[in-house]
Amino acid sequence: MDASFQKIKFSQFRLGFQDGVSIAIGYAPISFTYGLLAKTSGLSMLEAVLMSVIVFAGASQYMALSMFAMGTGMLEVIMTTFIVNIRHLLMAASLNEKVEHETTWKKAIYAFGITDETFSVAATKAGKVSTGYLYGMISLAYVSWVMFSTMGYGVGANLPKVLQESMTIALYAMFIGLLVPSMKKSTKVMFLALLAAVFNSIFVFADIMAAGWSIITATLLSSVLIEAAEVLKRKGRGR
């Protein structure tokens, strides 16, 4: 009976592992580029790898690199990362309803591994999802992210100094690459990004606040305004 149960758990892990292959492949170039840019941004290998190990969030890690390059303080980086990743709270709550009943510490493990991609794959699976399945999928995605981050840093360390310094412009190109697909799918995201950019520019060029806090304030302010506009729009339709 126990052996049969263990076999079922392993088969679920293997199924999740198989579904995680496509995610791992997709993460390879993004995490490799992160590692490359982490080196050119002045992080040590330990700092760069630890960020991938502990944070495991592409957009937040790229944003952190750009903020480090601007000399932003630690508190601002942490606050911005929290705001960017706050959607993960909703993802975890949604996934909690779909995954089989499990102990809290086991839920905490797979909650750490929730990303846009792992959530999408798990959420679209028919029926309930097992913890073993999530462990299999997330473990492969996580290993891919950390491994290619390390490889990217190693390659960046061997680039000529001049090329390393010029690579910092790739941060902005990467942000555009992450943002454009979302803007194409949602007009709301497009207006949110544009409004945040306008607020941030005003705060910085008018010297109202430091760069790090301007990003945080611009993001929060634009989010509140866009949501308020959405509420007013829905009320107008309801009349």
Image: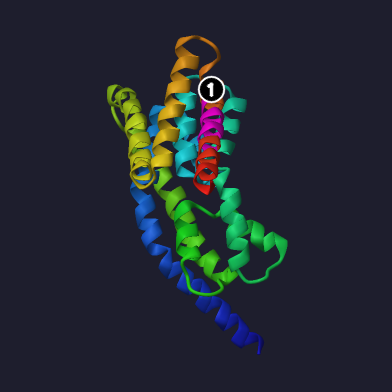
The one of 64 and 160 positioned closer to us in this rendering: 64
Please say whether residue 42 is visible from this viewpoint: no
Q: Nearer the viewer, residue 42 or 235?
A: 235
Does residue 200 sit above or below 45 in this rendering? above
Kind of residue at disc 1: Gly
Residue 45 x/y as whole percent: 47, 36
Query: Is residue 48 visible to the viewer in this orientation of the structure?
Result: yes
Residue 76 to residue 117: above or below: above
Residue at image point 55% right, 36% down? 228
Q: Is the magenta stretch mostly helix, strand or loop?
A: helix
User: Which quadrant of the view contains residue 162?
Assistant: top left
Q: Which residue lies furthest to the bottom in this view?
A: 1
Q: Is mark 1 on a helix, strand or loop?
A: helix
Q: Position of residue 134 (x, y in %)?
A: 54, 65
Q: Nearer the viewer, residue 21 or 179?
A: 179
* Residue 30 position in % (x across, y down): 37, 45
Residue under numbered circle 1: 212
Extreme residue toward the right, this view? 104
Please tell me whether residue 59 belongs to the stretch shown in magenta.
Answer: no
Question: Is 224 within the magenta?
Answer: yes
Highlighted range, magenta: 218-227
Answer few, some or many: residues within 10 Å of disc 1's Cα (few below 14, many 20 plus, some between 14 and 19).
Answer: many
- Name the residue at 54% across, 77% down: 10
